[in-house]
Amino acid sequence: MFAALFRRSAAVSALKTSQKGIVTMILMPEQRLRVKYQSTEWFAQSVQGLAFQPGDLVQVVGRLNATTLLIEMAID
């Protein structure tokens, strides 16, 4: 899915290292979330199309644009 998003938009960028964030709010199930990442709240979108709940730990794997993170399920 990340590769498909990357091909569609030049605004997508991968992070050099994946870092963890925490889901704080669900805005649109399986589509738009709020994630606390590096002490800041960000909009986020799942690259896997999974449903998350507030408090879920996620991996931040990239950015869709200047204000939206791309996330996937965190693996402990």
Image (cartoon, grey):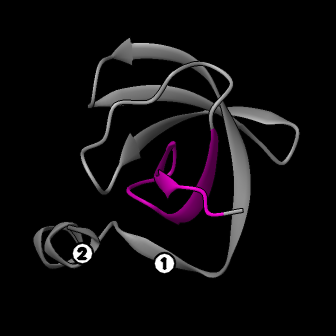
| Residue at numbered disc 1 | 14
Disc 1 marks a residue whose amino acid type is: Ala
Q: Viewed as shown, does residue 32 lie left or right of 35?
A: left
Residue at 59 percent of width and 59 percent of height: 60
Q: Residue furthest front?
A: 76
Report x, y in % for residue 47.
31, 56
Q: Viewed as shown, does residue 26 lie left or right of 39?
A: left
Range of magenta residues = 57-75
Residue 36 magenta-highlighted: no
Report x, y in % for residue 11.
33, 66
Q: Relative to 70, say whether 29 is above or below.
A: above
Residue 66 magenta-highlighted: yes
Residue at 44 percent of width and 74 percent of height: 13
Q: Secondary structure at mark 2?
A: helix
Residue 22 in which image quadrant: top right
Residue 23 in which image quadrant: top right
| Residue at numbered disc 2 | 6
Q: Relative to 62, say whether 54 is above or below.
A: above
Residue 33 in which image quadrant: top left
Report x, y in % for residue 44.
47, 39
Q: Relative to 5, say whether 38 is above or below.
A: above
